[in-house]
Image (cartoon, coloured by chain):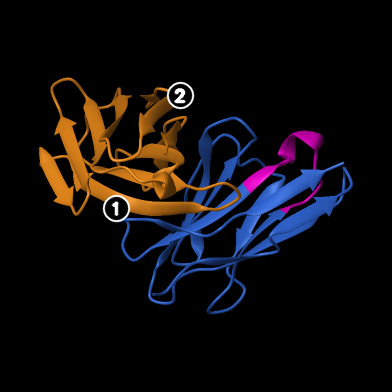
Amino acid sequence: EPEVTQTPSHQVTQMGQEVILRCVPISNHLYFYWYRQILGQKVEFLVSFYNNEISEKSEIFDDQFSVERPDGSNFTLKIRSTKLEDSAMYFCASSELGPDTQYFGPGTRLTVL
Amino acid sequence: GEDVEQSLFLSVREGDSSVINCTYTDSSSTYLYWYKQEPGAGLQLLTYIFSNMDMKQDQRLTVLLNKKDKHLSLRIADTQTGDSAIYFCAKGGNAGNMLTFGGGTRLMVKP
């Protein structure tokens, strides 16, 4: 069964450093998403992406964040200058159509020291 | 904005039925989902229901939707120890695709 994959599973970085989290969505899906879950808190929407552009973003997704689909398979989330409060589990998801079931990857745990 | 709420914790005995509840504030038509998260793992889609339905059954899982009360429930029949996990309900957005999640219900199944 096709699945969303994410790398790395755990990333440790120093405050102020740039990180890139990588995702490979399900191959025939057209919509891609990033969510995050700070420890003990709700899963929060960050951004959705379709047709090579952001279709929706939350207040969390400020100028420090960017997304890219650099090739036909990868979808990345970049955090330019990490802050302590960026420590969270980051989930990538994809869906075949817009208002459609989203399938999630296993997550990348980001720890900012 | 949309708010989705769940109770924090549920404990049941193996073989009993579990009912996990969820309430939401926005009544716009959309999909509602149940996801399962096991320790250290990602979000596994369990089932979903569209808001024009009242009930959906999928093997041991039954989803009930009360649109009037904005209440969604997930019933797990014959609960097993392997069902121990955190269960999240999530609601699709008004016009966009973002999901709004509840805080999750930790289900503990005792042998």
Amino acid type of disc 1? Pro
Q: Quadrant of the C terminus of chain B?
A: top left
Q: Quadrant of the N terminus of chain B?
A: top left
State the residue in front, A10 or B52.
Answer: A10
Residue at left offset 10%, top offset 37%:
B54
Q: Which residue is mark 2?
A: B8
Instruction: Give the crowd class for mark 1: few <14, some 14-19, many >=20 residues within 10 Å.
Output: some
Q: Chain of mark 1?
A: A
Q: Is residue A110 left or right of residue B43?
A: right
Task: Return the x and y of residue A7 as percentages of the image width and height.
Answer: 67, 65
Task: Return the x and y of residue B20 as percentages of the image width and height.
Answer: 31, 31
User: In the image, are marks 2 and 1 on the same chain?
Assistant: no
Q: Which residue is mark 1?
A: A99
Quadrant in which residue A84 is drawn: top right
Q: Is residue A61 left or right of residue B14?
A: right
Task: Return the x and y of residue B37 as percentages of the image width and height.
Answer: 48, 46
Q: Chain of mark 2?
A: B
Q: Which stretch did the figure color magenta?
A: A79-89
Residue A56 inside the magenta-drawn segment = no
Amino acid type of disc 2? Leu
Judged from the image, the secondary structure of the residue bearing numbered disc 2 is: loop
Which chain can be seen in orange? Answer: B
